[in-house]
Image (tube, grey):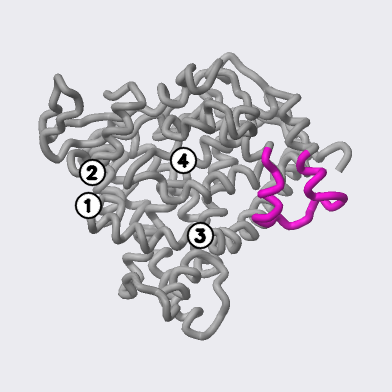
Amino acid sequence: MASSNEYSRKILNSPAHAEPCLVHSAKQILRAENWVFLTGKSHVEYRKVLNGLFTRKALGIYVAIQDQITREFLDKWLQEHTADPSPKPIMFTCRDLNMVTSLRVFCGNHIDDAGAREITQKYWDITLALELVNFPLPLPGTKVYRAIQCRKAAMKHLVAAAAKSKVAMASGKEPECMLDYWVRAMEEPTYKGRKDFSDDEMAMVVFSFLFASQDAMSSGLIYGFQHLADRPEMFKKVREEQDRVRGSDPRRPMTLDMLDEMPYLRAFVRESLRVKPPVTMVPYKTTKAFPIADDYTVPSGSMIIPSFYNSLHDAEVYPEPDVLRPERWLDPESSANKNPKNYLVFGSGPHKCIGLEYALMNIAIVLADAITLMDWEHVRTEKSEEVEIIATLFPKDHCLMKFRPRATA
């Protein structure tokens, strides 16, 4: 295990010597032919195509969907807490919000409500099967077996969504989701990438995005709620910024330009993810002997693990590293901003998270809408600060919250 920033980055940025292997069951669940397992030139070329799905123009389409779904869920949360004001864990509440949001961003109305519900309800089986230690064979009744059944059910809906998107774009409709944007981009005269993506291949890409976003975004969002509730002074600053940007209209639809006017919120999200990174390490496997140091060569076929936590809690880069301090990111001359190599929340190198802007945007939008429309209270327990690792980090008590309409909204 590489515990220093130097060695962690060396692993992440050495595709000729090591490749991500995640966990043993990953290829069985995600399918071995999925693009996430590509390496070398084929991975670089494939990623070039997918990078176009996260441009500012594309994110501008997604932000309206994220905002709409978030408000629908917040209204539902408030109704439920009005009926029963007792504290409730928000772990699965946030997961459901993130899954529905991502499905609508990626697939729009090309996936129906029944399909979205089925994927949302079953996806937890995939999370459980991607724990670092699991029975590796997909025998009936095992976690890996159940995860594969979930993937099959999800792929059925995602393949159909890809086919519907192609039909919609061929008829001249405007793009309303990621699949539409992808299909339309391939029709542009200036497009130079591959154009022969099958419905199944596009569905696999979307499924990989669900895998990459669901647990990490849920962890980040849950800790975002908890960190704000436990720090009234930060809660107040985020709310004041929202009121300034939104003016007298708390239900003003969110836009990218509005997010640009929220530096404190964006700094808070960035800092919250640093203090409690959703992913603390990613297993890699050496593809050949890896001379990682002058005095040591890692044998071929070995598991080698870059750790992110130490880089994100380096006291020389982040003074008082365990203290959540958004102001670190507001000063362009701060050591945090001058040492981007330490911010490994989304990894580094050729396999760095392709949807990092989408993830940051989604967490920010949910917290922005929530703090504009609601008040919330974190009911602390002896397990609130303890960490449970289920693919990603979560508070061990699943974060007990009370929600109520904002008193002055």
- Residue 245 shown in magenta: yes
The disc placed on residue 15 is 2
Answer whether labels 3 and 1 touch (C-beta < 8 Å): no
What stretch of residues is rendered in magenta? 241-263
Residue 352: where, in percent of width, then height? 38, 44
Q: Please name the residue that numbered disc 4 is placed on.
A: 215
Indicate which disc, 2 or 3, sits on the residue closer to the N terminus. Answer: 2
Nearer to us: label 1 or label 4 = 1
Is 296 or 93 nearer to us in this picture?
Answer: 296
Residue drawn at (81%, 43%) of the image: 243
Indicate which disc, 4 or 2, sits on the residue closer to the N terminus. Answer: 2
Q: Amino acid at mark 1?
A: Gly
Residue drawn at (27%, 41%) of the image: 20
Q: Residues within 10 Å of mark 2 (few under 14, many from 20)?
A: some
Q: Amino acid at mark 2?
A: Pro
Nearer to us: label 4 or label 3 = 3
Q: Is residue 385 above or below residue 263?
A: above
Answer whether labels 2 and 3 touch (C-beta < 8 Å): no
Tag 2 secondary structure: loop
Q: Amino acid at mark 3?
A: Thr
Tag 4 secondary structure: helix
Q: Please name the residue that numbered disc 1 is placed on.
A: 40
Tag 3 secondary structure: loop
Answer whether labels 2 and 1 touch (C-beta < 8 Å): yes
The disc placed on residue 55 is 3
Residue drawn at (29%, 42%) of the image: 144
- Residue 382 shown in magenta: no
Indicate which disc, 1 or 4, sits on the residue closer to the N terminus. Answer: 1
